Amino acid sequence: MSSRHSTLLGALLAVGALVALAGCDTYDGRTMDAPPPGATAPPRPTGSTTSTTVVLANPPVGSGEVAAPVVGSAAFADGQPIPARYSCIGDNISPPLGWTGLPPDTVELALTVVDAGAAAGPFVHWVVTGLDPSLSGLDEDAVPEAAVEARNGSTEFGWFGPCPPAGETHSYVFTLFALTQPSGVAAGVSGQTAIEQIARTPSVAATLTGTFSGS
């Protein structure tokens, strides 16, 4: 069980214990006096029902329950394995992505996918800039014509799927940047150069992490 799940389970158990205690009446031997004639019960407060809300680390795309950007995928949940279809041993195509909660002053969206656990240092799997803020996501293996894709770690343009060594499980961090100024990333640059340029541009970001195991 992951630390995130352990923390969530502990919180839920604690809430359950408090609810159980609140529902237990203790008897101390005393009796309740009868109410005087004509007495009525006090009015029940409206809207006072007790509820517990669990906030997910990666709320469903389009839920509208968050004030900050959220990015997700219909193909895999945050922290879960990326299907082989999107890896170097599968069709090697980009997975579907969706997002919500963009700030109103967003003028450009950018996406990066990086494997920080690669032996030779962070490996860039994808960088896409120039995405219109009116977009709410990307279909699998689809990039708008107006977008700019930088070179990935294999020096090719576009998506390069997860491809860890046999027996190793790596994590792939998808980051959506909501930029308040144009990134200015030009076609043909390396992924690392594009990421550095994006990082210098004012923005807010959201992340989604997927894993993949080499075989």
Image (cartoon, grey):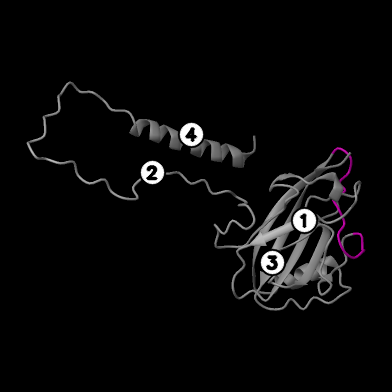
Pick whichever of labels 4 and 3 is earlier in the sequence: 4
Q: Secondary structure at mark 2?
A: loop
Q: Which residue type does callout 1 highlight?
A: Pro
Contact, CB < 8 Å: mark 1 with mark 2?
no
Q: Which residue is mark 1?
A: 96
Amino acid of disc 2? Thr
Residue under circle 3? 177
Residue at mark 4 to residue at mark 1: CA–CA distance: 35 Å
Ranked by sequence position, the earlier of labels 2 and 3 is 2
Quarter holding the C terminus is: top right
Magenta segment = 154-167
Q: Residues within 10 Å of mark 4 (few under 14, many from 20)?
A: few
**Where does the image place residue 78, in percent across and percent down from the top left?**
68, 48
**Front residue (pair 93, 2):** 93
Closer mark to the observer between disc 4 and disc 1:
1
Which residue in the protein does label 4 denote?
13
Q: Closer to the observer: label 2 or label 4?
A: 2
Please tell me how crowded label 3 is: few (under 14), some (14-19), or many (20+) other residues with Cα within 10 Å.
many
Residue sitting at 89 percent across and 73 percent down? 188
Q: Earlier in the sequence, mark 1 or mark 3?
A: 1
